[in-house]
Amino acid sequence: MRAVRYHGPRQPLRLESVPKPSPKPGEVLVKISAAGLCHTELHFLSGLLNLGVQPLTLGHEVVGVVEDAGAGVESPRAGDRVILHYYVGCGRCVHCLVGDENLCDALRAEYGFIADGGFAEYIAVPARNAVRLPPEITDEAAAPIGCGVTTAVHAAGLARLSAGDVVLVYGVGAVSFGLIQLARLSGAEVIAVSRTPAKLEKARALGAAHALNGNEGKVAERVREITHGHGADVVFELVATKETMAASTAALAKRGRLVFIGYSEDSFTVHPIQLVITEASVTGSVGNTLGELVRAVDLVARGGIRTVVDRTLDLGEFQKGIDALQKGQLIGRAVLKP
Ligand SMILES: [Zn+2]
Ligand SMILES: [Zn+2]
């Protein structure tokens, strides 16, 4: 089968022929129909994220149809449309036992990270990782749920969003589109920041009350102006450069929660007094859980959240997607179709 393979930092991705997997007991074989390109792919290519596993098929937003099942699988069944949860935890550690497989001490797989992912024609995964997709959601529209929307559901939970909060979403991509809509559903007021006017326009269309162009600077000051001095109760950091982190911290309200989802080469520095006198808190947010994927699918199926797909490309055209992502040209996901 065809697969887009990663060969380490600063090496180009290559379309190659690899053996088609076969499902082991408890697994299903999924014929992939759509897979989203995530910003994480760029971190693999630059080497900022280096998990040391290569060659590797990337792709962790995976949608398809169950074609076959190994011994002992009751559901899903052949013909079922599914979206995949990309973590396979050990099932025994203290994190797995409460469903936090994203924090597992001994992951068995993380598709597209340490195990072959979805930029391919087929993938075999444990049956419990394949979540059935309702007919209301097309394959292309479903792809950005896998990481984009589900990671937003996870981060929103950590941020303890509540009605009346002012939420600053710093950086606008697939996760942000989910965050903006979740924040609106929670009754929060959203301020989105991006350097790209078209992304800001989309942020507004999805419910952001304010859209600030980062190129114009003074983001924290503008947030104070908009909120009459209050600041942002929650800041979601999806850019995390020196400049944005300084603005994010300065924009925090008292008891504000700064949540890191994105990262860059830059380190985060803050004088403790900034946190002490405001009782602000800082947290990281990594990935998502199976329960959150089920919830995200439900939110999209019921129309509470819309996914944003910029373009669909044939698997062989993956480089076009990577290039557009790198140049910041994508408003939402590029989705690859094998
Ligand atoms: Zn992702
Ligand atoms: Zn575990």
Image (cartoon, rainbow, N blue to C red):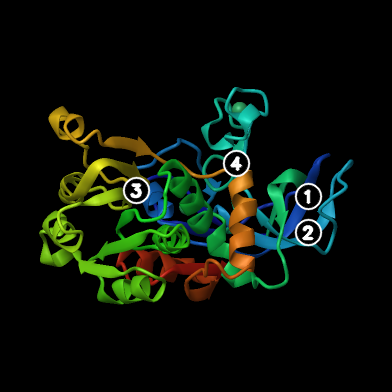
Dot 4 or dot 3, earlier in sequence:
4
> In what element is the residue under mark 1?
strand
Q: How many marks?
A: 4
Q: Is residue 332 above or below residue 182?
A: below
Q: Which mark is residue 28?
A: 1
Residue 194 is situated, as x and y percent measured from the top left of the image, at 26, 65
N-terminal-most mark, 4 or 1: 1
Q: CA distance from mark 4 to mark 3?
A: 19 Å
Q: Nearer the viewer, mark 4 or mark 1?
A: 4
Given contact means CB atoms under 8 Å apart, are the residues at marks 1 and 2 in contact?
yes
The tag earlier along the polypeptide, 2 or 3, is: 2
- In the rendering, which numbered label is found on residue 291? none
Q: Of 182 and 171, which appears nearest the observer? A: 182
Q: Amino acid at mark 2?
A: Val
Which residue does the image show at 33% across and 62% down from the upper left? 190
Q: In this orientation, does residue 338 appear?
A: no
Residue located beneath label 2 in the image: 66
Q: CA distance from mark 2 to mark 3?
A: 32 Å
- Residue under label 4, please give it: 87
Q: How far is mark 3 from mark 1, CA to CA? A: 32 Å
State which mark lies toward you, 2 or 3: 3
Q: CA distance from mark 1 to mark 2?
A: 7 Å
Quarter of the picture containing the N terminus is bottom right
Q: Nearer the viewer, residue 241 or 255?
A: 255
Q: Up-down: is 58 above or below 303?
A: above
Does residue 295 appear to the left or right of 200 in the view shown?
right
Apparent side of residue 72 relative to residue 151 in the rendered image (left or right): right
Residue tagged 3? 262
